[in-house]
Image: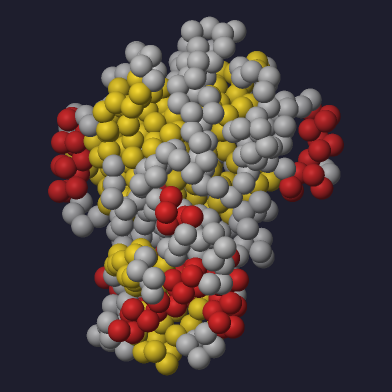
Amino acid sequence: MRFALLIWLLVCAATLTLAQATEPARAASRYAKPADIPIGAFFRRAEYSQMAISPDGNRLAAVRPINGRDNLVVIDFLAGKLQVISNFKELDVVDFVWVSNDRLYFRSADLSEVSGATSLKGAYAVDVDGKNIRDLTFPLERTREREARRNSILVHGINISFRILSQTFDGSGDVIAEIFGRSQSYADVYRFNTRTGEYKLLTVSNARQRCPLGVGPRPRTPYRHPPGRAQGSHEPARADYLASAGRRKRLGDDWPRVRQGKPGQRHAAVVRLRQQDPLCFVQCRPRPEGNFQNDIAQRKLGEKLLEHPLIDLNGGLIFSRTKKALVGIRYSANVPVTTWFDEDLARLQAALDKALPERTNAIDIADENSRYVLIYSVSDTNPGGYFLYDTEKRSLQEVSKSREWLPPALMSKRSFIKYKARDGREIPAWVTTPIDSDGKDLPLVVHIHGGPWVRGYSGIQWGRWPVAQFLASRGYAVLEPEPRGSTGFGRSHYTASFKQWGLAMQDDISDGALYLVKEGIVDKGRMCLFGGSYGGYATLQGLVKDPDLWRCGVA
């Protein structure tokens, strides 16, 4: 009964009626082939996204369309109540995080900007009943200063950062947060009360210090960039330098050095400190990053936790406060994966994967009450949905589909491949071929990601992903390469791009298309380039460098 009421609330939330909500499903059943699906259906806002369970496991928060914009809602599924938290009409909620069981922090932006860029406009903390909202866009300024800044042009070019690093778990309601306070180039760490605005600086006076890591009420593992090294440079996050990292017994103590990196040598970035002993977790290069334990007292690497042959394991560590342990690592290889070190959670994952086969099932467990488990289940053809699992009753109930108007049976398969560039470098990529084709001699669109110093794929996501599905529904094969310069595939893959814009980087893209021609998948006479930002540059450069190879380009 409880879950039935929850589903009814989700379907009927805001201004939707039950009849209106079921119309997309009826429309989806009328599609006979992929080309029948309207263009807008692929890019329509998800009915629910970013759903997360509260620390006590009694509520769900999610983003859903209201007023044609993405807004924040909270569902108390035990009491059968749904609360609309934000009511933006010209902005969108882009992300949120639970501050405590009864309070949330969220940020806003305009996702309808013509440029396609996401420029943050504001940040707020609010109670789960929509009350006691506090503007945290400029969290360290007085109200008058904040309003003057908000009304000036400066708000559009500023770093809006209030990244919550940890709760304090002491009943105070304070959080440990990374805030751009004294500088707009380097953030500091503060103890901050999101209700009163009271705060205390926790980091030392060196403005170049970065201190985002640690657990409990104090930050304990800072690291610094050497003088003259800009944090905002195009080096991958924490790629070369760890000048100082350690643990202090008291706030006034100096930081002991744990590891020191040198340019071009092995990278070691502190990921997280363990609560009960002097062990921290670090990431190391130059191969694709792996996770290791690091003994602070002995200043040496210890047990290797996990390493992947293709990708860097950047973060993704899952800790349990009740168990006081690292319980798993979540990362995206060719598909999202969670490796559990905890046997109970590993068995739970296996059971859910069996119940929801041929999908990626990411589980979200409330740390203070493990009875209810939230699952986000998605695949290359299924746009995803949310489930609740009751561990006491061992019952699995669907909460909501993200895009019920898109029938999985008409979606095209998305495959991971690796091909060799002309100099022998292996390039990872994803290929989508139309489901209603024989997979031979197809027209091709090469979708090039921006950056280029980013990872263009992180999990099966409905951002870049709908483009491939839409084009495949119209008969095109789609290649999404990760050419040299893309981050997340080891340092060598990144540094091979230096001084190679328009040269080897461009060849990687062309060689991917030619590989598909050689495999018989693509018609060489019908190939197109497409992308934005760096992808736009590479599109135009491809037309200049290899004019006979491409029929067109969309930059």
Colour convention of the picture: secondary structure
506 relative to 524 in the view: left or right: right
Res. 124 visible in picture: no
Residue 492: percent from the left, percent from the top? Answer: 42, 54
The residue positioned 44% from the left and 29% from the top of the image is 270
The residue positioned 40% from the left and 50% from the top of the image is 490
Residue 246: percent from the left, percent from the top? Answer: 48, 19
Residue 493: percent from the left, percent from the top? Answer: 42, 57
513 relative to 205 in the view: left or right: left
Q: Quadrant of the N terminus?
A: top left
Q: How many labels does the image show?
A: 0
Using the image as rendered, state which of residue 274 and residue 19 is in the foreground.
274
Q: Quadrant of the C terminus?
A: bottom right
Q: Is residue 241 above or below residue 309?
A: above
Res. 523 visible in picture: yes
The residue positioned 54% from the left and 88% from the top of the image is 547
**Figure quadrant of residue 4:** top left
Residue 14: percent from the left, percent from the top? Answer: 52, 48
**Figure quadrant of residue 381:** bottom left
Using the image as rendered, state which of residue 76 and residue 355 is in the foreground.
355
The residue positioned 66% from the left and 61% from the top of the image is 113
